Amino acid sequence: CTCFYDSFWIDSAFHFCSLSYCSTTLSSPVEASPAKPAVTPSSLEGTNETSPATSHITSASDSQRLAGTSLVNISQSQSLPSCVLPSTTFGSSVLESDFPAVLTFKGVSVTLENNSVWKQFHSCGTEMILTKQGRRMFPYCRYRLAGLDPERLYNLVLSIVPSDQNRYRWSTSRWEVTGPAEHQTQGLIRAFSHHYSPCKGSEWMGGLVSFYKLKLTNNAQDQDGHIILHSMHRYIPRLHVIPVPDGVVYTSGQPVVMGPESMTFTFPQTDFMAVTTYQNFRITQLKINHNPFAKGFREDGNNSRLNRVTTEAQHLVKMETQPFVLKPAELTEIKEEVVDLRLVLKPIMSTSANKDEPYVPCIRGKHALGELVLVQKRLCVEPKEENHPISLTPELQQGFSVIPETTSTTPTSTTSTPRSSPGYRRRRKRISRRWANSRGREWKAASVSPTVVHSPSLTVAMQPELDDVEGLLFVSFTTKVKQYKLLLCTRCVSKEFISFNRCVVPPPVVIHVK
DNA sequence: TCTTCCACGTT
DNA sequence: GAACGTGGAAG
């Protein structure tokens, strides 16, 4: 890896002082304000124009098939104070209004043109998808420049550097640090040279500068010039404004040199988490709502995909206590029976401001946020031994308790698929994933009563898109030999919260038994 | 957690 | 109409 990058290195005595926030914070009156956004640590003020840190930026040659790509040495940036949000505040809306839309340095000002969108995403914790073949950013970096020398040539380069030295995971409803960051390519990362580079200052200032062509990848062997990042790590884009030294005639493929006149502009609100699959459902929704390419997923009434889902859902609502609809392939293995099973859903934790109102954290009503968001994830209880009563783990005690009022759930079939069979595992996995992936909603942890020997696994989820029925609760659980599914209607949505203690589950429910 | 494929959308 | 950009489902 080092050798590969070495081929792009050029020796330069230039000091590269702007691979930090100093270039933007020093002369930005907004940044100089004490009311600094949480993502901009005060220690950044300690950096300055005369930093001895040296760096180089080179553009890849055409022969390397990396057109538009540059390399930036970020090794010194690691010794700089990192621009870090504490993990608990990533995606928070603290001081969002303080994020500057304009940064000025050495008389050059850069405006983040789509600042409002970035701020919206940032308030939820922006995520960017990485794919092997490369994925565009959304939002992407779009700037307006002023204060450049109209006649001088400039290269505009975007680099994306780690925001911190952590690796994260999505846990329930927030990002958590899980350990140190993966090795970050030995201090060298790629940068993306704008496809118009170099251009006269007047030309750059004449319109918007968009880096929509930039793509992110997790393929460390990428040869297409995409920016290589690690999933589950935080990054932040930086715009480098690099004057072409007088007398230098730029030719395609020639390395771009970061000289002492170079400037770097970093907008804290463009900080993002690299992922391979969206973790936060709110981010997915923002992407769908703002990205024109994702229009097909919008719930605007003209979407055939969602219309189909809605129709099915409404059908289920009408069925109420009728059997859950399964795919034809699954129906062949199913016979039907009526089981007198009543469930009472009972919240165990109450953290509502109003202690009288049982409140499941993170489940919020449509009227509160404009959307229903489910948050806690998964619920699967596996018995350690067959026929062994299940005990609640501390984690599960945070969630629901599901207590059958009757005990007539004894399996009746003796010819069920063995739990250990591939077919069983496959079906179980498929169903589990289907639920887990259902429209990006997350699972509420749940458990079964220790008295229910035949319900070792239980799944509970709300279907928020069915707001017209005010909350529909699906319950699916698996015994060691059988799998039950049923559909329950809760009708328990308040304006702000969903209170499960008032859930009334319909009496005897028809259940499919495998 | 990641990859591949897909339907559906924009460019 | 081709190429490309999307998020989701499935594996």
Image (spheres, coloured by chain):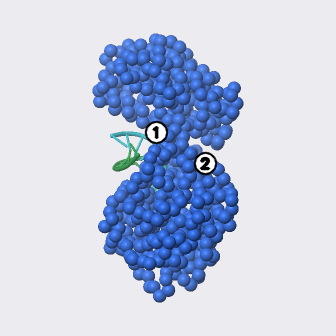
Chain colours: A blue, B green, C cyan
Residue at 59 percent across and 57 percent down: it is A41
Viewer-side residue, A208 vs A395: A395
- Judging by the rendered image, the residue that carries numbered circle 1 is A437
Q: Residues within 10 Å of mark 1 (few under 14, many from 20)?
A: few
- Percent of width and height locating residue A170: 49, 43
- Percent of width and height locating residue A262: 52, 75
- Percent of width and height locating residue A96: 65, 54
- Judging by the rendered image, the residue that carries numbered circle 2 is A92
Residue type at mark 2: give it: Ser
Answer with left or right where residue A474 lies relative to residue A481. Answer: right
Q: Chain of mark 1?
A: A
In the figure, A210 relative to A514: above or below?
below
Viewer-side residue, A383 vs A181: A181
- Does the residue at mark 2 contact the one at mark 1 (Cβ under 8 Å)? no
Where's the N terminus of chain A, which quadrant? bottom left
Where's the C terminus of chain A, which quadrant? top left
Residue at 68 percent across and 59 percent down: it is A34
